[in-house]
Image (tube, rainbow, N blue to C red):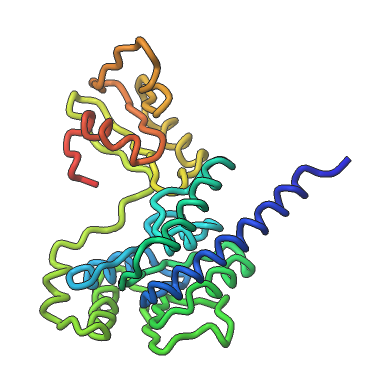
Amino acid sequence: MVNPNFFRRILRRGLRRILAFLSQWALKKHKPQIIAVVGEGKTGIAREAIYRVLKSKYPIRRNVEAPDAEFVLPLIILGTAEYPRSYFGWIKILLKSFGQLLLRPAHKHLLVLEIGYSNKEIFDYFWALTHPSVLVICGDAPYLSRDQTAKKIIHIKETDNLKPYFEAATKVGKLFKIGEKEAERALAHFTLPPARIQIIPAKDGGLIVDASYQYYPPSERSLDEILEALPGRKILFTPETLQQEGKAYEFKVRKGEIGVILGQKKKMWKTFLELAKTPWFV
């Protein structure tokens, strides 16, 4: 009997090749300049600081979750705002991307890509797609091959404050003709990247555990550990529970209760606004 994992591996390899083809088509058509952020340090902070500076002057995109997930970077390059969770979802995304590349006009933009490391094969796959013009290295990056380089390389020495990240973002800004004063203004209200799972107060006295996601759900183990540490009645808010017919769903999390928000952010953001005491927190 054939191992079902064998067919999954075949499908993943096929999907990887299709996404590589579409991504390379998109890069060739739109010719975005790519800033890659790699390393064993706090790459998420570097990515956000660079994004804030460049956003002040240019149309730009960046990845915000699971930088080491196998297909996240190709989806960002294609401008996709979700990580499909089914075969039908993948078919839909691939057809939509093909149609957009065929019919929509080219547009100039920048891409800030945090390239995570899970294994060398996936990292090399990401690198082969991107070929960045600017490479920002946070701390050490022993997995970089000798030929994995860029025209401009910026190193960030890891410290416990934000200064080296801001300095690196300012250097990247200068490469794109953004002055120090402009960069300083862009970083004036900088906030750290939000945690994958956030705990915030509910407006009716309880707590909200926001485990919603844009591309890929957070670790179930991490969520379980957080919920075990929080005493109180747990109330689940998911796309499925909200769509239950005939059920008057009450958007309240009172004192002694824990509201747990699961599902994609695009489906759950209204629920978050209904429940949270300070929804602008995220």
Residue under the point 17% across and 34% down? 277
Q: Residue furthest bottom?
A: 151
- Residue 229: quadrant of the picture: top left
Residue sitting nearer the eye, 192 or 159: 192
The total of numbered circles placed on residues is 0
Residue under the point 33% across and 41% down? 266
242 above or below 120? above
19 above or below 29? above
Residue under the point 51% across and 51% down? 95
Q: Residue furthest front?
A: 103
Q: Residue furthest top?
A: 246
Residue sitting nearer the eye, 163 or 154: 154
2 above or below 58? above
Q: Position of residue 274 (x, y in %)?
A: 21, 29
Residue sitting nearer the eye, 40 or 118: 118
**Residue 188 visible, this angle:** yes
**Residue 34 visible, this angle:** no
Q: Position of residue 84 (x, y in %)?
A: 50, 45
Asked if residue 2 lies left or right of residue 137, the reply is right
Residue under the point 68% across and 52% down? 11
- Residue 3: quadrant of the picture: top right
194 above or below 259? below
Q: Position of residue 6 (x, y in %)?
A: 77, 49
Asked if residue 239 lies left or right of residue 202, the reply is right
Asked if residue 222 lies left or right of residue 199, the reply is right
**Quadrant containing the N terminus in the rendered view:** top right
Q: Position of residue 164 (x, y in %)?
A: 28, 77
Asked if residue 145 lies left or right of residue 4, the reply is left
- Residue 191: quadrant of the picture: bottom left
